[in-house]
Image: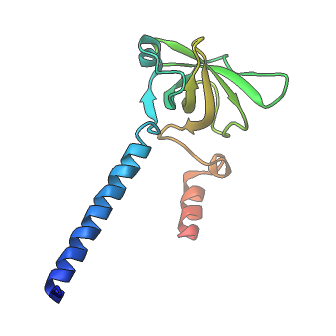
């Protein structure tokens, strides 16, 4: 017995819907441990994540804490939030906005000794950020440059 065209479309729609839902569930299950949770130093000190869990640590770079290791590419510094301090080690090229006293988000993993090993650094700037090229310009000059680029 042949299936009517109307019923064939309905069966194909149901199959496509089941496949789509299955793919979504499979993707969610595969990525369940890949989510990167955000912590501030006081949270990470009070309840440290598992050593193999990818997390983000955000806070302020403590004044006087940035030290470059002898290899020239590894830096260590301290991230603090006013309540707690977390030592961080990063191997790589730091962003140009990464300076003492500025905000930073470090992506990586916590070691069992309490040191955060960063794989990536995201430097944050305040709302008064001005590009280097425009720092020495007057307001009128800056407005002119902006107008010329639009």
Q: Identify the residue at image location x=75%, y=27%.
A: 74
| Residue 92 x %, y % | 73, 36
Q: Looking at this view, is 83 or 32 the one in front? A: 32
Does 18 sit left or right of 59 as displayed? left
Q: Which image quarter is the N terminus in? A: bottom left
Q: Looking at this view, is 139 or 34 the one in front? A: 34
Residue 71 seen in the figure:
yes
| 57 w.r.t. 41: above or below | below
Residue 102 seen in the figure:
no
Q: Identify the residue at image location x=67%, y=16%.
A: 64
Does 92 sit left or right of 2 as displayed? right
| Residue 121 x %, y % | 60, 35
Q: Quadrant of residue 7?
A: bottom left
Q: Identify the residue at image location x=53%, y=13%.
A: 85
Instruction: State the count of labels.
Output: 0
Q: Residue furthest front?
A: 1
Q: Looking at this view, is 47 or 9 the one in front? A: 9
| Residue 60 x %, y % | 53, 24
| 6 w.r.t. 57: above or below | below
Q: How is the image coloured?
A: rainbow
């Amino acid at each position: 017995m042949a299936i009517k065209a109307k019923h064939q479309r309905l069966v194909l729609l149901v199959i496509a819907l089941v496949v789509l839902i299955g793919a979504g569930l499979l993707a969610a299950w595969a990525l369940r441990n890949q989510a990167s949770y955000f912590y501030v130093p006081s949270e990470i000190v009070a309840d440290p994540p598992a050593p193999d869990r990818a997390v983000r640590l955000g806070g302020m770079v403590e004044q006087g804490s940035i030290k470059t290791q002898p290899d020239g590419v590894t830096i260590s510094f301290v991230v603090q939030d006013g309540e707690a301090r977390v030592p961080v080690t990063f191997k790589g090229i730091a962003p140009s906005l990464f300076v003492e006293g500025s905000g930073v988000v470090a992506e990586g993993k916590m070691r069992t000794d309490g040191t955060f090993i960063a794989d990536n650094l995201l430097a944050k700037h305040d709302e008064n950020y001005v590009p280097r090229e425009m720092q020495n310009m007057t307001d009128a000059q800056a407005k002119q440059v902006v107008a010329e680029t639009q």
